[in-house]
Structure formats: C-alpha cells, structure tokens
Image (tube, rainbow, N blue to C red):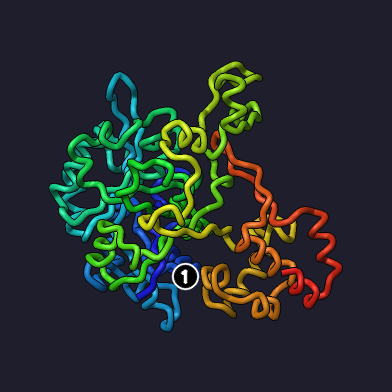
Amino acid sequence: MRYFADLHIHSLYSRATSKQMALEDIEEAAAIKGINVVGTGDFTHPQWFQSLKEKLEPAEEGFYKLKSSFSKLADSQKSTVRFVITGEIANIYSRGGRVRRIHNLIILSSLEAAEKVNNALSWQGNLKADGRPILGLDSEELLSIVMKLDSQALFIPAHIWTPWFGIFGSMSGFDSLEEAFGDNTKYLAALETGLSSTPEMNWRLSALDKFTLVSNSDAHSLDNLGREANVLDADFNYSAFREVIVNKDKQKFLYTIEFFPEEGKYHYDGHRLCQVCFSPEQTKEVRGICPRCHKPLTIGVLNRVDQLADRRQVSLSDSNNFIPFKKLVPLKEIIANVLKTGVKTKLVNDYYNKLIQRFSSEFNILLNVTPEELVEFTDPLIVSGIVNVRSERLNIKPGYDGEYGKIEIFSATEAQKQKHLSPEAQLGLW
C-alpha cells in the first residue's frame, strides 16, 4: 500500500502551538492533506497522553485510529487516517565543556510502551510543563532508556542541522553522531533533515550514508501538517513501516516531500534583529561577525553543511543508496502568493476548499492532477503557480536566524503578463 506519513507534530499542549491541535482536528486536517499516518506528538505530556488513551483505539498492528464518537470525518473518510505514537524531547545538558541543546524524535510501537517511557522520564524532569519537555538528560542516555523499554522504537535526532537545537547545529551540536551517542549510535536508523535542508545537502556527508533520511512537518498548526512528509509503499502496520526505515529499503521508501530549503528559518546565516542575511561566502568575508551589531552571526544550515561535508555537490544519480525527494510548497501558500493576499484570508480558503472538494486531497493536487484538469476548477493563474512549483521555477529570498524565507511563485511582470492571457494560452506556456 502506498501511503503518506508525517511523524513529527505537536499537540495543543506544546508551547507556541495552535489550540486547534486536538486529535479530532488533526485527523480531519490529515485527511484533507492526504496524510495516511500521522504522529500523535507529545506522548510524554500527561493530559495529552490521557487524551490518546481515551480517544484512540487499536487499528493495524502498532497503528491507532480515532474512535468514531470523536471523529469529525464523514463515514467514507474515517478509515483513511492512522496515528502512530510519537513525541519530541528537548535534551539540555553539558558535554565536552559545552552546553548541548538537542531535540530528539521518539516513535514507539504502542501506547503501552509510551506509558513505560513516561514512567521512566517522569523522574528526569517535569513532563507537565510542555508537550515537548525539557530534560537535563544526555541524549545518549535518553536513547539507552528508550531502547531498553521498547526494542521496536525508532529514535531519530530531530531537524539535525538547526543551529540551536540540532545534533549538528552550529550553536550547540556535535560534529559526528558517535561524539553524541557513543556506542549507542548503533541503535540509530534514521535522521530528520529539517525544513532548512534537503536530502541532497545531507548526501554531502559520507558519514550519513547508512542512515535513512526522513522528513516531517514539525507542525504546530493544522495548516502546516504535511509540509514535509514521507511516501512509503509497504504493508500498512508499524512493524512493516519500521522495517522500511531500519533497512533503508529503497523499493518501499519511495521518496520524501521537502520544503524548498531556502524557505526554512535557518538556511542562510544572519541576524534577524539587524536584518542581516548572508550566504556562507558573505559570512566568510566578514569573518562571521555582524557588520551592524558586531556580534557573532547565527550560522545557518547551508554553512554548517559546508563545514562538515566531505563531498562536493551530490545528486541522486551519484549513488544507488539515495532515496529520492520532491520539493513542494503548501497549496494555500501557492494560492496566497499568486493572488497577492494573506494565507489565512477567506479568498484563499474558498479557492482551496473548492479544489479539495473536487480532487480529494492537497497531495493529490500538488503531485498528480494535470494542469488541464485543474484549470477547469480554479483560476488559471493558480494552476500556473502549481506548475511553477512542480518545475521548481521560483524566486526565493532565503530564511535566516529564525526568519522564514520569502517565496515568489513568479515575478510581478510574469503575473501581469499572464493575467491578460486566456486559459488556453496559459496552458500553452507550460
């Protein structure tokens, strides 16, 4: 079975997260997006864990579904979304004379396993304080605890390049996995690339070749579900899913869905308050010092990859070991960008909902539906925008120091030109 999986999200109990991130709303949004397996997020939080036990019931082995009494979906949709037990831990600890701030994603085989992990971690810190708890626990020790309590767990260093909270981050990370996890590195099967890097950037490090690269949304709101995801073709249960990840099975792990990395919040270097955004080359010219405030710049993902890479630019054709990927822009963002209006406006929602009603899911629209089909149901300019994204014909001002990058689907001149064309002529442009 081919399915889409987004394994890293957060609940309404995490800081800076929408109050709409309740199970019934997550299920509904996942169905609209076209996500078949979604992480629960935040299994360590006592109230959220109680909600998981109350509202979920077993489905396929290791997968759960929302009980019908809680679901907002129509009967025809209720079998389309499954949950897998996941959570993220913020580990803040001292190692090698430095303070380390590392986020780790944990995927468990059952609610019963989650209860065991929660009992063990409750002695390490306050699990009630945040859906993503902060523990003064070494990541190596956390990995050991998790694997002892659930041998079928997946422990995945999260958004590995993020400056402040990634295992390779410029501000608090390590230069190798072995430095961070020691002998326990053998338990790692996968790494999460994060929004500001693509698999192609990670391929530049030969040390990462044996690991499966996964991509997830890290969603704090419903609209952000599926902005990154994984596409598998495997038996639909936890054991089969885990086997694909552990074995890096290219026949069954078809591809990942990626943000355009320039749009990520930490792709370039810079200082947000000073409005300084630099490429790695520009940062080198100023020796890493902000020319405005004269303090060290926040070194972003692209620069950090350059520092650790032992290969030059690498492509999919360079190895049989690489899993493909596709870069997408969320549909509402495309519509808003083309119409020059806000993502949360009624106008954008109206266009979006009409397309979803006709073509079932956002992933289907972004990946599969032909321009000729789309143009019958929406503004031709929006169709042209979707095609531009598929062709990667975009203008992007890179993100830096916590500021998202800015995407332009096409220039103002192109937009003005196409506004005066008939739908048939616009189709001809493609």
Q: Secondary structure at mark 1?
A: loop
Q: Position of residue 337 (x, y in %)?
A: 69, 57
- Residue at far right of view: 420
Residue 252 vertical placement versus 147 (above, below): below
How would you rate the neighbour count of disc 1 (Cα within 10 Å): few for under 14, some for 14-19, many for 20 or more? many
Residue 46 visible in the snapshot: no
Is 200 in front, or is 233? 200
In the picture, residue 357 is in which quadrant? bottom right
Instruction: Report whether 195 appears left or right of 391.
Output: left
Q: Position of residue 275 (x, y in %)?
A: 66, 30
Q: Position of residue 59 (x, y in %)?
A: 26, 73
Residue type at the position of mark 1: Gly
Residue 285 visible in the snapshot: yes
- Residue at far bottom of view: 76
- Residue at far top of view: 294
At x 50%, y 44%, the residue is 313
At x 38%, y 62%, the residue is 38
In the picture, residue 163 is in which quadrant? top left
Instruction: Report whether 124 appears left or right of 157.
Output: left
At x 50%, y 57%, the residue is 227
